[in-house]
Amino acid sequence: MEDTSFAIHPGTKKQLIGDNFKDIGDLLSFNIEADVVYFKTVNGHVAIMFYNDKTARIVMNQKKRPQLKSSFAVIKEQQGVKLEVVDNKDFVELKTATIVINISKKPFRVSVLDNEGKTLVSETDKGMAFNEKSEVICYKKMTDDDHFYGFGEKTGFLDKRGEKMEMWNTDVYAPHNPETDPLYQSIPFFITLREGKAHGIFFDNTGRTHFDLKSEKDTYSFKADVGQIDYYVFAGPTMKDVLKQYTELTGTMPMPPKWALGYHQSRYSYETEEEVRQLANDFIEKKIPVDAIYLDIHYMNEYRVFTFDNDRFPTPKAMVEDLKKAGIKVVPIVDPGVKEDPEYSIYQEGVKNNHFCKYLEGNIYFGDVWPGNSAFPDFTKTNTRQWWGEQHKFYADLGIEGIWNDMNEPAVFNETKTMDVKVMHDNDGDSKTHRELHNVYGFLMGEATFEGMKQHLHGKRSFLLTRAGYAGVQRYASVWTGDNRSFWEHLQLALPMCMNLGMSGVPFCGPDVGGFAHDASGELLVRWTQFGTFTPYFRNHSAINTVRQEPWSFGEDVEQLAKKYIEQRYVWLPHLYTLFREANQTGLPVMRPLVLEYPTDENTFNLSDQFMIGDNVIVAPILTPTTKHRVVYLPEGKWVNYWTDEVLLGNKHHLVEAPIDILPIFIKQGTVIPHGTIKQSTATPEDELTYHIYLGDEGRTEYKLYEDDGTTNRYDEGETFDQELVCEYSSSIVNISLREANGSYDPSWTIETLVLHNVNKGVDVFVNGEQISITNQLFDKTKKTLKVSVER
Ligand code: MIG
């Protein structure tokens, strides 16, 4: 009945949420203990503390003194911040070097200001409140100029102003559309852009939370069904600063193994060893690059995790080894549900050693998933995470270096789609219900898996892909956006979704290329593969009973087009890898909305159909069928068409041509991008690095390339290669210097090629002070490019 018009029967009016909230009331008293300021109000308790000069935390509990243990998301300790406390008649002021928190006493309202006295967040006639159902809510003032980014994995456009969103990790197979919410990930963090400046809020509550940026014109709110109001304010002042501050608190991603950045091929499922080997051969014979092949649920013995079905996969170890020799890694799926089977060792151990989620009364919780009736590890327990991590020795011993976590919301086949919320998690002695901890289940499974694989791989980097997660998930895993469909609309949807994941601290993300459910078409696969070239995570995946979706599934033309863009991924890899290093160091995303780089240009505020790679490349994919052109917005500066070298003026919309073989790409004039070469996989060492230098009339530009061995954790001990290119240029002379910094890693390539774009013939070129003779220059008249090769 829910799916017919009966759903809007006049008798079904729902009660409005947000009813019956009671304000926490006026301030009664306050005191300071161990760098925390505690406030008692008529109806509640508030604590305020600082993590550093730019990061404040505000916690409210209506019943008792706030609990300051933070969720698993936060890894940073509070730093001793110099705090000045001023107690006035009407307000209390907490001052650090860079932010001021102003607390009005009657009523108790919190404002956070920057050091110039500009308000970042403030409360209105409403502040913090709660109701009899134990819901807690916090209202904030919203100005006409506010734009909102982040919120993790959400459908809809880039700017979340005017949206209502919910956080409750959910397995959504139904088609994702603008009102599909929540999805698999919960990242209750967002950035507010206001008149070119930014601040952020992270609402650290692991139960179901709600964000309302819609119902009122000048107020937004965040609310939780259970637990405390517990939020952090990041003072910015730029969006990049906010992201840095947020990822200082919740961590940045580790360097991924390079193979994780190559092209990946998946399907639900490659069902036998023979099929997997054949698939690998097809890629190699067709010379289509590939770095990983995935094993979906069919590889297991009746869906028992940590097993192989020996009929379908008689020699998994040999298979993994043989593929590895061919440059291809095997990534198996691992779900959390453990089959209830008293003869299955994992189940036995889990029961005997108390690893499964239980009710308060002591009985194990069982839910129906692929293996049938199953128990679920209680990942909130440290020793259960260790146990789960240890089990991964099974995979590591087979030579496996990457794991795919699915169904970890956790998804259960029942009405609520998840575990009974009454289940009691042990949480290392601080027990809490599943209702309170639901959103961290997948995150903690990720931690267990990542730490386990790290141990078993002895210094080699592992790769983890996860469907569910919480704030901080970037520390352990990359994220794919779940069960999309082979719809053009879902290709469109993936752009703002991935951009906002990036703006939520998760740089390593991507959708199933070609779409998971429903049948793809050749044209859709081509356009989606073009987009995939630049999504941080690049995997083609499709569902059982849909048409095949490997690059060659739609005939020769489509195969050649898909191949061209898969190859491009490898050409762009040195640049992408450098950007992943930046993400590792600073938390900034690889794939960026234009607004991150051009925050005062209103054309970028809600620009959802094009994006940037780093700070100098704009990618504008074709997102509709039978389309051979599109409008592209280019912000200030001059931009160079990557394919034709045509120079286009910024601050302008352009109509660009994009026949089926063209993905529109634009490079900012006056910048540099490095290119590698086409190869079968990242296992083939790079032998030539090319710097493309896009010259303007005159000026200076630089690029810092990052490289390391791509496979071990030795980059953490300084085994890195950092090369700095500086180019000073005018119309008659180009002076390039290439300098290598401290790192002790020696890269595999010996030739470095420099391609100067937009030059005249006869220009004087110097590399590290030495003039390059004209005989060593290759000039292209039509493109106005000049090529020079030097030995490294
Ligand atoms: O309910 O393992 O999102 O990628 O192929 C389906 C089978 C379970 C959902 C994942 C999808 C995967 C599929 N899984």
Image: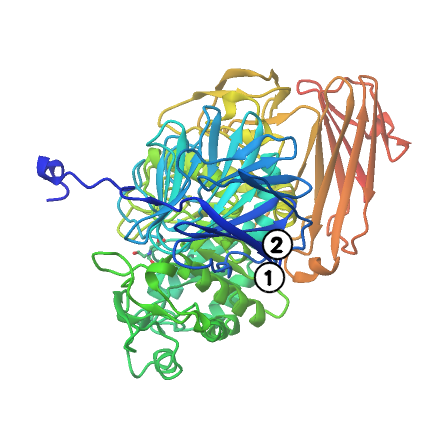
For mark 2, what is the residue? Answer: 255
Mark 2 close to ligand 1, CB under 8 Å: no
Q: Residue furthest front?
A: 89
The reply to whether callout 2 and callout 1 are in contact (CB within 8 Å) is yes
Q: Is residue 286 visible?
A: no
Check residue 429 in the rendering and tell me which mark sits there, or answer none. none
Q: How many residues crowd around disc 2 within 10 Å: few (fewer than 14), some, or many (20 or more)?
A: many
Secondary structure under tag 1 reads loop
For mark 1, what is the residue? Answer: 461
The one nearer the camera, 158 or 305, is 158
- State left or right for residue 473 relative to residue 276: right
Which residue type does callout 2 highlight?
A: Met
In percent of the image, x 41 and y 52: which residue is there? Answer: 44
In percent of the image, x 58 and y 35: which residue is there? Answer: 113
Label 2 – label 1 distance at C-alpha: 8 Å
- State left or right for residue 427 relative to residue 348: right
Q: Is residue 140 above or below residue 442?
A: above
Q: How many residues crowd around disc 1 within 10 Å: few (fewer than 14), some, or many (20 or more)?
A: many
Q: Is residue 119 above or below residue 20?
A: above
In percent of the image, x 34 and y 69: which residue is there? Answer: 424
Picture quarter with the N terminus: top left
Which residue type does callout 1 highlight?
A: Arg
Secondary structure under tag 2 reads loop
| Image location of residue 99, percent across then percent down | 63, 40
